[in-house]
Amino acid sequence: MKVKYYPYSLKLAKVFKISYEARTEQPTLIVELSQGEFKGYGEATAISYYNVTINQMIDKLIEVSPLLESYDFSTPDKLWNEISPLLLNGHSFLLSAIDCAAHDLYGRINNEKLHELIADDSKEIPLSNYTISIGSAKEMMDQILDKPWPIYKLKLGADTDPNVLLEIRKITDSNLRIDANAAWNLEIATKWLPFLRESGVELIEQPFAIENLSDLDEFRTICEIPIVADESCQKEEDVESCAKHFDVINIKLMKCGGLTPAIRMVKRAKELNLKLMAGCMTESSVGISAMTQIATSLDYIDADGAILLSNDPADGVKVIDGKIIYTNAFGLGINLKKEILDVVV
């Protein structure tokens, strides 16, 4: 195989705020694996919260490129098993990009659409939510009015006024999910509970810090709304522990190391009677096209990352009014635009 990479700055259409940061752009790295005439693509964004930088990923990719270029590629899972010992601890974002590119390459070589190979035909594809960034009631309501959508995920913080939910409910009948990004404690969560119930919130994502299991367990004794593990569920081994404390796990490809481990996480979560969600970060249609390949196995999905951008560098899986729309292309269905292919590295 040959290896190329494309660093790129994703521009957000609007400032995006969550409990611990606000940003207007997102650095990303797109990895290309090619064999003969076929090319596959994967993506890894540089998230400061996880201490991931573009330069770190490029340096590590250059380091492992000789192994990749000498590898006799057959299937993505075999490649993952070969390179994961070098990347899983500390470089899972890059590992995910390589693994997703390998899945894309495999599908293109074999004239297969990956989502059809992975599909759970017993389930319908869930609708994706659209994320509303943290702000005042007016700011959040303006975002909702600007983007009619069947499901909204509301980013909330420790200082957010719970009345924001009642104000939002006045202007929309859409399903509401909330995400505190680990900003709450038991006192705050308990204060929010009547407002969550009155506004009909569908689920609560990561209300407490990873280590704060005591508050989580106590809150679950009084809260009937499903609670989702996000920051608490990063790698395969987290699925077992999350089953003891959460109702749902949120699988993110970059955290777990790609589609190969994500598929195994889906299987194990079902065995443990956990419900399933897949989520995204701020990423382009390359990353979104990869994570939506497992959509038919899920109960919930958060696939709006590319919708929030003003300069998506790829065409791929679309999310229109919440619906996941696959392309007719093989692999992950990705087509890079000229603006990124012109990047010289």
Image: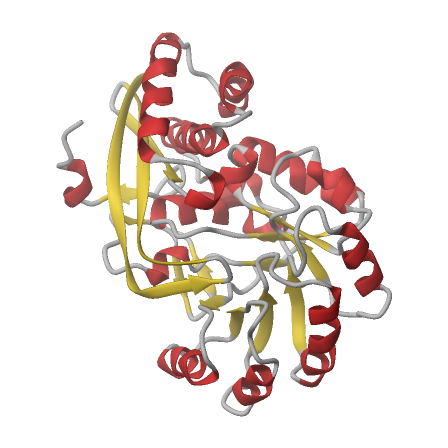
In the figure, residue 156 lies in which quadrant? bottom right
Q: Is residue 243 above or below residue 208?
A: above
Q: Is residue 23 above or below residue 120?
A: below
Name the quadrant of the C terminus.
top left
For the point 31% across and 36% down, which residue is it? Answer: 30
Query: Is 205 situated above or below 327?
Result: below
Given residues 231 and 301, the one toward you in this image is 231
Q: Position of residue 265 (x, y in %)?
A: 66, 38
Counting labels gives 0
* Residue 12 visible in the current orientation: yes
In this picture, residue 323 sits left or right of residue 217? left
- Depth check: give the residue in front, 234 or 299: 234
Q: Is residue 328 visible?
A: no
Residue 46 % position (x, y): 38, 40
Image point 56% across, 31% down: which residue?
260
Q: Name the spot of residue 247 as percent of width and height, x first.
A: 75, 56
Q: Quadrant of residue 311?
A: bottom left
Q: Quadrant of the N terminus?
A: top left
* Residue name at image x 73 percent, y 51 percent: 212
Please tell me whether residue 256 is drawn above or below residue 315 in the rendered image: above
Residue 51 location (% of width, % of height): 45, 37
Q: Residue furthest right?
A: 221
Q: Nearer the viewer, residue 316 or 141?
A: 141
Q: Which image quarter: residue 136?
A: bottom left
Residue at horizontal 24 percent and vertical 34 percent from the top: 6
Q: Is residue 222 left or right of residue 1?
A: right
